Amino acid sequence: MDNVLVPYLSSDDERERQQHLDELVILRAAPLIRKVLRRRFGFYVNAQGVNESNQDAEDLYQEAMTRVVQVLNQLESSSSPTDIENFEGYVSRVASNICIDFLRDKTPARSRLNASVRDILRRHEDFASWEYNDEILCGFATWLNTGKRSFSDQESGDIERKLEAFQSARFSDEDVRLAPLPQIVNELFEWIGGPIEVDVLVRMIGHLLRIKDEQIELLTERAPTRWDVYLSVDTQSGESHVAANELLTRLWRAVTQLPSEQRDAFAFRFEDPAGQDLFTLLVGTGIVNWSDIVQGMGRPIDEIIRLRKRMPMDAVSAADELGVSRKKAWKWRFRALATLKTQLDI
Amino acid sequence: MEVAFSSARHVKNPTRHLKINLGETGIFGYSFRLRYCEECKTDFEVTHHLSTWQLQRFCVSALAEDELTAAAIHMADCEICHKRFVTELNRQRGSIPFGFTLEPEFWFRDDHVDFDLLVGLADETLDQETQEIINIHLKTCETCREDVRSFLAFRKATAREMKVSYARPNYESAGDIPLAAPWWHRLQKTPVYAAATILLVAAVLVVGVIVLNKRSATHEVSKNDETNLANERTSSPSPSLSPDAVASSSIVDDSRKVAVLKDARGEITIDKNGRVTGVDEVSENSRQQIARAALTERIEAAEVLKSLAGGKSGLRGDDNPGKEFRLLYPKRSVVVENTPVFKWESLSGATAYRVYVLDLNGNQVTQSQDLPSNQTEWKTETPLRRGQIYSWAVTAVVDGKEIVSPSASAPEMKFAVLSTGDLQELKRLKNINSHLALGIFYAKAGLLTEADREFQKLIELNPQSELPRKLLQSIRNLRNGN
């Protein structure tokens, strides 16, 4: 059993055990789950597991946390507990496996189909997509701005069964997979006879075309991501702690000299090998204190703390925080990187 | 323990002297106290050292925001707590070294190419910097690389498909477009032809205005019909009109039936509300047309045929007395093939023929080579665009002179190519094997000969029924121009 679990499992006092459970979940599991979501799947949530622009990330975080708590409760109550040799590795695996189930629905081939269908709806003059009651609907251009049919409210299994009938009626003498996509879209619209959600249309076409993605490889417990390798390039791991601190000090100085929008765009996205944000890293290494951060970022302390809870941010959150489009935020970050690389000569 | 009192710091303005309200809010619990600034509306001052529990949670931001703020303010001034924080953070961090990278590949690793960017790439509307950033991301993201490749390939592959019309065929109205005839000019080598041409153009303009007026009236009627039908459907939704209700399509009240017909595929029923059962696979549009034909017991002329009709010109005359020949096919009709075979009568004394096909703007779309005198049909190799109306003409060379048919004063010989949407519907209906559905489809698409054939078959299957006979009669009236 991993030593970090021993105080929790061996405690006789209920209050004390609850405290140990909190520590395991809040201090160990939560940061790790955040890191797994970021590194392996590019999903960002703040310290409370929130990302208003990415509901999927929030759901995955919550699900992983719930799973970890369940396992810890089972460990505590079971007479012959499962042996967890490495708690952090176990948490990583739990988070990774949850994401794999999720990704099965968001696999590349489906995502490509989604882009193709949306492109057809956008470009073909006979088709259209529009927002109606907070849903993105699509159909013939003549149906524009009308509500959807009840068709898409059916269970997906029912829709799939009906699609078999559709296929035999409309594509009995030809392979639907060889038919041009606009033709399939047209046939489906005619068959349904009214607007449907774009997502449902994509799912139906995916079913008709039998689009399946390759099995996603299970991630090993402690397999390093390629980004860990990337991070090791500049981390100067072979050098002394003093040298690393020296580099961080120069980085901070250069960051504070950037134009404010570039400085923010860089800081919001910064992530170190441990998954820590820029502010925590700088204060944690003792290079600066919180007053220095306030001064360097030109923001009050409560603002700094609010930002730190969200950092590292994903592209959408960063753009949202900066109040600009994603593309604009990209450019600021891109320019910041170019300047910093030149100034730090790395 | 009320020790290590930190200096008062205003959160919004650290240098400002504060008016302190001493309502101590114990939001951190029993070992921790704050003071509250009324002006800032926030807790700003921590009056105790941070506990280990607080420090641990501060490291992972697992405290409420105001608590985190208060702790940070405290640490900014309290060297002891700052050092404890550094120690705790290092403990949590373990052996992971401090460091960072500035490699753009790392920094843009999660900036995937979304739909808007895919479109921007395909349309080449992205600026250089964005393009550069995308290229950086693509270096490391195999999925996005494939997404881009796949999207661009898709764009290329569907370039032609995007021009295919899937809506109801939208035949361009002959009356809407001024006629011009480049090939015509080539034939106008004599003053007589030139004069005839001027008169013809004037006549066509007059006819055009008349047709236009008629068409807008027809359009209104047609629109009203559709509205009525839609109203009928709204008030009494048809169970067979959509895939939602396929299962209940057989529930039709006998007393409401208008017609029950035997068809090649089985029995078809139409009730008073326009519900059609027995042909569930046909499109909504086809079902509407079947219902309308059954309820009215007649078939209206296809819109396209009106556009193909030759206006009777007062200029009709004999431009080439004794030297006339007729165009046989296509003759003011719709053709299924987009590479139709053109047929004409032979002309005595002709040594060669040449066929011209033009669009409604008078632009030449294709023409044949000089064809030998014994050849009176020609198949175009250039596919004609579906859903469009064309005109065609043949010149015959007699004694070195060109004789054209139709003659200068005669109306153009127009034809339409079946639209892609209709072609697909036709393929589907052929699979469904319903003479009724096919007959009505042919009629509505302007293929009257084919419609005639289907209704004859329907009559054979339903010798006692009046409806197929009336529908056939309706078709024959249309063929006869009534």
Image (tube, grey):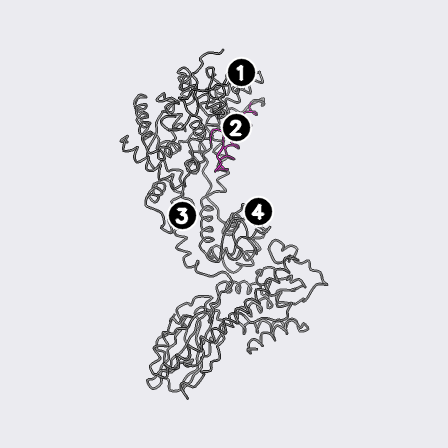
The amino acid type, in three-letter code, at marker 4 is: Ser
Give the letter of the chain under mark 3: B
Query: Which residue is label 1 attached to?
Result: B30
Give the letter of the chain under mark 2: A
Mark 3 Cα shell of 10 Å, populated few (<14), some (14-19), many (≥20): many
Q: Closest to the observer: B192 or B142?
A: B192
Instruction: Tell me the residue at 63%/60% (across/down).
Output: B231
Q: Identify the disc placed on residue A156.
A: 4
Query: Which residue is label 2 attached to?
Result: A68
Mark 1 Cα shell of 10 Å, populated few (<14), some (14-19), many (≥20): few
The amino acid type, in three-letter code, at marker 2 is: Val
**Marks 3/2: CA–CA distance:** 38 Å
Name which of mark 2 and mark 4 comes first in the sequence.
2
Query: Which residue is label 3 attached to?
Result: B118
**Marks 3/4: CA–CA distance:** 29 Å
**Marks 4/1: CA–CA distance:** 54 Å
Secondary element under disc 2, as helix, strand or loop, is: helix
A302 falls in the magenta region: no
Give the letter of the chain under mark 1: B
In the displayed structure, does residue B463 sit left or right of residue A189?
right
**Marks 2/1: CA–CA distance:** 30 Å
**Marks 2/4: CA–CA distance:** 31 Å
Secondary element under disc 3, as helix, strand or loop, is: helix
Q: Is residue A241 above or below residue B434?
A: above
A73 falls in the magenta region: yes
| Nearer to us: label 3 or label 4 | 3
Secondary element under disc 1, as helix, strand or loop, is: loop
